[in-house]
Amino acid sequence: MKLVVLDRDGVINQDSDAYIKSVEEWQPIAGSLEAMARLYQAGFRLVVVTNQSGIARGFYDHATLQDMHRELHRRLAALGAKLELLCYCPHGPDDACECRKPQPGMLRRVEQALSVSLAGVAVIGDSLRDLEAGWAVGARGHLVRTGKGERTLAAHDELLRQREVMVHDDLAAAAAVLLNQ
């Protein structure tokens, strides 16, 4: 099946250790939206799965997050693409929820909502927790160097090699690989 699961911050848009708290701060990484459009136009279903603990921490609210996601949808539509599904976890790291990555809850929700298995599907992220959530459902991990990707690679290089994670400069490079498979 042609499906790809994407993390948001650091993969699609710029990330910040101070969190992305507004539509104005939500800035796509150069080439990321175009890469998503190329995947979509080649028949891939696009899914975004993102931790958004800034809600639990009080940095922004659900309405602000929805505004950011409307902007993502608007920009994708202008490129002739759309998301099949966008899931987010609003919980903080101490909330012990099943949806916050590295837990696989959001990915299980994707499987249920789309009536699919994510086994073998590409999960593209910039952090170990993105990959761990994917591994829990049998997905293939792809790491981008954008966002927290370089830090993740430096801290977990051996594990990533053992798990045969493909490493890409950015989402555009990851998309090029997927389109050539």
Image (cartoon, grey):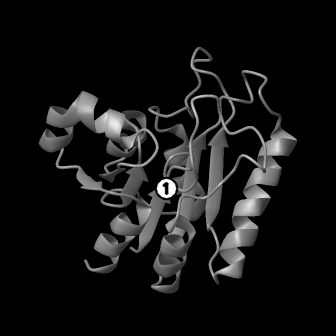
In the displayed structure image, the side of residue 165 where residue 114 appears, left or right: right
In the displayed structure image, the side of residue 163 where residue 35 appears, left or right: right
Above or below for 105 versus 170: above
Return the x and y of residue 85 as percentages of the image width and height.
63, 61
Return the x and y of residue 67 as percentages of the image width and height.
82, 52
Above or below for 46 versus 123: below
The residue furthest top is 94
Return the x and y of residue 132 as percentages of the image width and height.
35, 37
Residue 58 sits in quarter = top right
Residue 120 sits in quarter = bottom left
Image quadrant occupied by the N terminus: bottom left
Amino acid type shown at disc 1? Leu
Return the x and y of residue 164 as percentages of the image width and height.
17, 49
Q: 24 and 143: which one is in front?
A: 24
Q: 158 and 85: which one is in front?
A: 158
Q: 82 and 116: which one is in front?
A: 82
Q: Residue at x 35, y 64 (%)?
A: 174
In the displayed structure image, the side of residue 149 where residue 99 appears, left or right: right
Q: 154 and 80: which one is in front?
A: 154
Residue 81 sits in quarter = bottom right
Q: Residue at x 73, y 24 (%)?
A: 56
The residue tagged 1 is: 6
Q: Residue at x 70, y 62 (%)?
A: 72
Image quadrant occupied by the C terminus: bottom left
Numbered disc 1: secondary structure: strand
Above or below for 117 versus 159: below
- How busy is the neighbourhood of tag 1: few (under 14 within 10 Å), some, or many (20 plus)? many
Q: Residue at x 83, y 43 (%)?
A: 64
Report the label total. 1
